Image (spheres, rainbow, N blue to C red):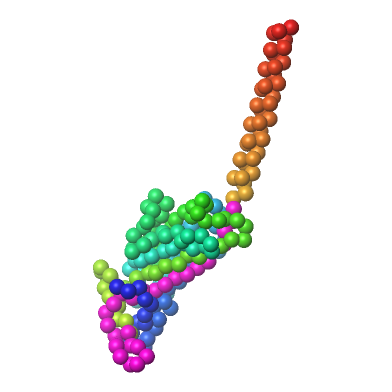
């Protein structure tokens, strides 16, 4: 099945299947959250249909992109690539959520950087089981073609701002400095005890 967006045909007219789908960054409670993603934090992406008549059957693909860096594939062919850091939740027939972690050794979390999250979802008619096909208008410019049963696929594309976790970096420096100071004190004390014993 080719993953191309198409138009749904109904008695009320024709609509682009992509018009039904909205994707956005959300939190663990599935509430919209436009804050920057901090390194090591979980990334939640909510994908929602605006119509109870057109349900989300499954997330077919999801990829994280950043300029100058190889794509990080989260979901491919409706399958999670790394289950250790990614999971899907079906909140309702018209809403699904993907949670994943963005590896900082692949994605650059420098201040001001962003990532793009792109993908496709497969839609189905309300009450369908097993991904019942939607009627899609396949008419071409020359008038050929017509409504036929195909997988109705909608794309999504959002941008998320990134933020480094400066508290972690600061803690590492602070602990290292404290350890170094403690070592110096211990050495000085040892030298003082040794000098007394020698005396």
Q: Which residues, given as a range, are shown in magenta?
A: 138-164
Is the residue 171 above or below the residue 62 in the image?
above
- The residue depicted at 53 percent of the width and 66 percent of the height is 159
Where does the image place residue 49, in percent across and percent down from the top left?
40, 72
Residue closer to the observer: 136 or 97: 136
Outermost top residue? 199
Where does the image place residue 121, in percent across and percent down from the top left?
38, 69
For residue 51, say whether it is visible: no
For residue 71, say whether it is visible: yes
Q: Quadrant of the C terminus?
A: top right
Residue closer to the observer: 169 or 97: 169
Where does the image place residue 37, in percent across and percent down from the top left?
55, 57
- The residue depicted at 66 percent of the width and 22 percent of the height is 186
Which of the 4 image quarters holds residue 181?
Answer: top right
Q: How many numbered marks appear? A: 0
Residue closer to the observer: 61 or 134: 61
- The residue depicted at 64 percent of the width and 40 percent of the height is 173
Determine if the magenta segment contains residue 45: no
- The residue depicted at 66 percent of the width and 35 percent of the height is 177
Q: Is residue 177 left or right of residue 94?
A: right
């Amino acid at each position: 099945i080719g993953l191309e967006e198409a138009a749904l045909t109904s008695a009320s007219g024709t609509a682009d299947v992509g018009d039904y789908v909205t994707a956005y960054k959300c939190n663990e409670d599935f509430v919209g959250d436009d804050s920057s993603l901090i390194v090591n934090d979980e990334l939640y992406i909510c994908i929602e249909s605006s119509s109870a008549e057109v349900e989300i059957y499954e997330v077919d693909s999801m990829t994280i992109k950043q300029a100058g860096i190889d794509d990080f594939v989260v979901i491919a062919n409706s399958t999670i690539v790394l289950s250790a850091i990614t999971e899907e939740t079906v909140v309702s027939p018209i809403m699904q959520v993907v949670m994943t972690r963005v590896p900082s050794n692949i994605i650059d979390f420098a201040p001001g950087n962003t990532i793009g999250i792109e993908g496709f979802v497969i839609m189905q008619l309300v009450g369908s089981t097993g991904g019942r096909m939607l009627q899609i208008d396949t008419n071409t410019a020359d008038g050929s073609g017509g409504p036929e049963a195909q997988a109705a696929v909608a794309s999504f594309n959002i941008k998320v701002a990134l933020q480094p976790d400066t508290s972690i970096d600061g803690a590492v420096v602070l602990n290292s400095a404290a350890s170094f100071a403690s070592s110096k004190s211990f050495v000085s004390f040892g030298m003082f005890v040794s000098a007394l014993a020698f005396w």
